[in-house]
Amino acid sequence: MRLTPLRAVLLIALFTLLAYANSLRNGFVWDDETLVRENSFIRNSTYISAAFTTDLVHNSHGGTAYYRPLQTITYMVDYFYWGLNPVGYHLTNLLLHLLCAILVWLTIRQFTDNPITALVVALIFAVNPINTSAITYVAGRADSLALAGMLGAFLFYRHYREQPDRSRWFFVAALLCYTGALFSRESAMLFPALLLFVTGRPFGRAFRNALPFAVLLFAFIAWRFAVIQLVDKPLTAPWHIPASLRVEIFFRSIATYFGLLLWPVHLQMDRQVAHASHWLTAAGAVCIVTGLIAYWRGNRNVRLGLGWFAIALLPMTGTLNLVATVAEHWLYVPMIGFYFALASIIPWRKLTGAAALLVLLAMTARTIDRNGDWANGSVFFARQTQSARGSERAFTNLGHTLITAGNTDDGLKALRRAEELDPRSATAKYNLAVVHLKRGENELARQKLTECAALDPTDATIWELVAQIHEGQGHHALALRYYRQAISCTRDVATRLRCARFLIRHSHAKEALALLDECAYLEPGNAAVYRLLSEILHDIGQTTQATAALDLASSLDRHS
């Protein structure tokens, strides 16, 4: 049977939907809570400009060094149609991944005359269980957004170079796609280097091809630097990695990535190799030597694939001050080159085709199973503690999730384990304070908060919890003092709203109104501000103004 473009696309769609259909019933997990459920910046279109002038979490929770405005814009679209129903967000992730898989197929077809090679690479990419951390995880959407932009830019630009006189709009489309990629994720910065490599010889022509995108990249870097500096966040992780360990991490991460690509099992979101065995370092060296031999002895497509893999992966090998030494979703772009090189070596016959089909079915089954790990926070973090038994963060997150669900006893056990693993974890101590407060153990809660404050005195949530303790004991003046301390540590409107509710509870309507004025100044599009304002105005008898404030809140958040 002849493999037509339509049949190829239908096969890619079939396998992608089969692999990820069960992810649609999952909830929000981990960073999904911050980026979606608690994110006021996705509730209406008034925040569009703010999405481009703030970091990913919009300065809340201390801010981040991630600048991904297009990711926020897509959440806005999801919220407009779905509210906080996670089905819509997972559906968007699935469709974006399907788009990327089709674009992978179209891209590989530009380099090989064998349609089977391109289809196999696209199908392996589509169903690979490694990609669940980018697809099943709503917060991982930036990977597919960036890749879609990069591949779209490549395909449009290639069409433009083939017919420059009749298709200048394709050049504009290429630049727009790449702009979207840059505003989606940092990995898009590698695109000019990838384009320079795959264009090949002569170098002058390759350089001219990459130049427009390099100019766009430098303009974006200047803009991004200004935005990140405005929020005063570092671009690197705070810890120091010695040079000798950095070299070992490089080899260990290479070995880990090769292992995951060849045998994607034991998947987890908290993988570290800094203290792994020295055998893993040696394995990394073997992988590099093997890759170099394959590059020099392989055909053109093998060299193209391995070159793409190396360029896209090297910045993600833990040699930089990144937030992790290894992350599975960092393979989302590099794996295309790896599997292209591998597929270019294989002679495609009936036997090898049957073997590839078995591999695809096995990967699909593993992806379906892995999607279940992301069902909800309790399931996800419980399984993460099993695969990363030495991770303080995994146990802290599990404890927090269990507490939120009302299971304080098991939550307490998880948090105590987290504190054992890292006695200086302010997050674990804070959550322990929450448990003690729920149990009425105020002194123990205060003790943990004192330890937290010593570790991070600028964390507003610490002072909020201290305020809650004093309010519960009837010390309203002290509680107000600590609420003000919390406000001084952050520009987060949510903290101010909680303080305003405290003021309302204790008959300080005038002060609450003044605080709401500040909230409206900081976030004029926040519906919760006007909803609370409506409550205060109604209580003091200003019903007309209260109704107007409530109408404004409803217009700003149609799902509230």
Image (cartoon, helix red, strand yellow):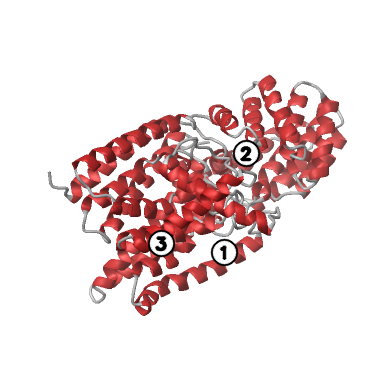
Q: Which residue is disc 3 drawn over?
A: 307
Quadrant of the rendering where the N terminus is positioned: top left
Category of crowding for the residue at label 2, using alpha-carbon neighbours closer than 10 angstroms: few (below 14), some (14–19), many (at least 20): many
Question: Does 16 sit above or below residue 382?
Answer: below
Q: Is residue 507 visible?
A: no
33 versus 251 height, above or below: above
The Cα–Cα distance between marks 3 and 1, rounded to whole angstroms, is 28 Å
How many numbered markers are drawn? 3
Q: Position of residue 75 (x, y in %)?
A: 48, 46
Crowding at dot 3, Cα within 10 Å, few <14 / some 14-19 / many 20+, comes out as: many
Horizontal side of 523 relative to 162 (left or right) equals: right
Please tell me whether residue 454 is drawn above or below residue 296 in the rendered image: above
Between 458 and 392, the one lying in front of the other is 392
Disc 1 is placed on an element classified as: helix
In the depicted structure, whether residue 513 falls above or below residue 46: above
Q: Indicate the amino acid at tag 2.
A: Ala
Left or right: where 514 falls relative to 252: right
Q: Are marks 2 and 3 in contact (CB under 8 Å)?
A: no
Q: Residue 416 at what x, y percent from top left?
A: 73, 28
Q: What residue is rendered at 48% in x and 29% in y?
A: 375
Q: Residue 417's spot in the image, x, y percent?
A: 71, 29
Name the residue beneath numbered marker 2: 546
- Residue 198 appearing in the image: yes
The quadrant in which residue 194 appears is bottom left
Whether the residues at callouts 2 and 1 have beta carbons within 8 Å, the answer is no
Q: Which residue is mark 1?
A: 224
Of residue 185 and residue 341, the one placed in the foreground of this image is 341
The reply, left or right, for residue 377 in relation to residue 477 is: left
* Mark sitting earlier along the chain (2/1): 1
Q: Residue at x 28, y 49 (%)?
A: 346
> What residue is at 42 percent from the left and 70 percent from the top?
213
